[in-house]
Image: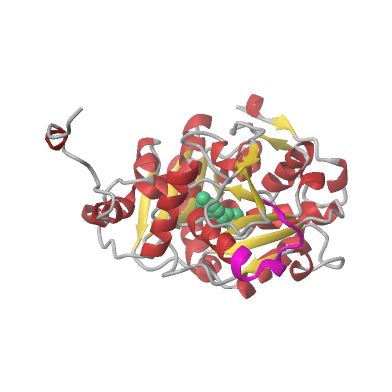
Amino acid sequence: MASVLTPFSPPDWSNRLSHIPKYFVRLGNMNTPIHEWKLPNVPSGFKVYIKRDDMTGSTLSGNKVRKLEFLFADAIDKGCKNVITCGYIQSNFARSAAIAAAQLGLNCHLLLASPEVVRCFANLTFEGNVLLDKMSGASIYLISNMLKSSNYATDIKPRMEKLAAHIKKETGEDSYLLPGGGSNVVGLYGYIAAFQEMISQGILEEFDDIVVTCGTGGTVAGLSIANYLNQSKLRIHAISIGDNKQLFMGHINDLLKEVGLGDSVCADDIIDIVDGYKGRGYGLSTPEEQEFIQSVSENTGIILDPCYTGKAANGLVQELTSNPDRFQGNRILFIHTGGIFGLFDGKMDSYLRQRKHPEPVVLWNDLDDLSI
Ligand SMILES: Cc1ncc(COP(=O)(O)O)c(C=O)c1O
């Protein structure tokens, strides 16, 4: 097992950070491409590009893969045979953890909660991410009450610890606990390493602003710490799809302290958190958001997800239109963080069926009347 561990060579500019991981395991297909993106309704004068982190893999895709490369390396290095994590029922992180565990020969245990009521196993359908969780052999535990990031420490983590103790008692094996979204000081290095990849792709010269979705805050924390250490002129914007700005800033400030930058800088100095685009709330979509996702797919061939990137890209277009001074230049790089399986929970299907124009499908018989 130890052979999958690759020594991590941190970029020179990150040397002053503490908690630099010793190893990573290669799970993703890096480097992911950057290309121009003709996003509909972007005001003239702005040019939008996209970093395709949705292409880190097919099933093991998105931003989570980068965090998991460090988290799984740490788990394996510590001799753990099990990983335990948590999330909402359609969690992309949980799905990525389940698939990575199957690839690496570890057991995966997922504590999943739903924003809608799933009272018992019989009401749970294996759709979207949950289907892949199940196919990867993960053990799924449904949490009946709502999962909120604010009660992770007092409610969810103790349950994960209890499960770890149970596994230890039954099997003698150790478990590695992954916080929701993998956003801790180990997972942070996923986007510190990604920033180095993006430097090699010319971002420092070619862009003015980077825009990314903010869920648990780990992705933007890695990017903005890396950006700060490089003393770059890029501005990092994080479009929040869930918790409010204060919560993220608090979380990112904690991470800054943990890596030893707490006295030098605070989250407010290095990140612009954009609030106001969470719509109906986590995991819920408005018809306008669904129409936006549909329009982007049709016009650009880029598939956004309903939970994260759809809301964030919509927020980006709206901010470019109504608040252009928020951006420090006109060359914008949007990081596509994946999440495609969130589209397969049935909601987008219902939306497309309700749309009257164009017809959802045309029966071939109707075409017989066409004169050719
Ligand atoms: C597809 C997708 N994009 C963005 C994010 C947000 O990333 P982070 O949790 O690191 O803020 C998540 C997860 O939370 C995600 O699944």
Image quarter where the C terminus lies is top left
Q: Looking at the image, which residue sits at the far front?
A: 371
Bounds of the magenta span? 319-332
Instruction: Determine which quarter of the picture holds residue 246.
Output: bottom right
Q: Tell me residue 4's x, y (percent).
A: 63, 27
Q: Image height check: is 217 above or below 63?
A: below
Q: Is residue 50 visible?
A: yes
Answer left or right for 68 relative to 111.
right
Q: Image height check: is 355 above or below 197?
A: below
Q: Is residue 78 visible?
A: no
Residue 209 belongs to magenta span: no
Q: Nearer the viewer, residue 9 or 238?
A: 238
Q: Image height check: is 154 above or below 50?
A: below
Q: Residue at coordinates 57% horizontally, 36% vertically from top-left?
A: 56
Q: Tell me residue 172's x, y (percent).
A: 50, 41
Q: Tell me residue 47's x, y (percent).
A: 67, 51
Instruction: Determine which quarter of the picture holds residue 89.
Output: bottom left
Q: Nearer the viewer, residue 232 or 130?
A: 232
Q: Tell me residue 276's x, y (percent).
A: 54, 72
Answer left or right for 192 relative to 177.
right
Q: Residue at coordinates 65% horizontally, 67% vertically from top-left?
A: 273
Answer left or right for 125 relative to 103.
left
Instruction: Determine which quarter of the picture holds residue 228.
Output: bottom right
Ligand 1 resides in the quarter of the picture at bottom right
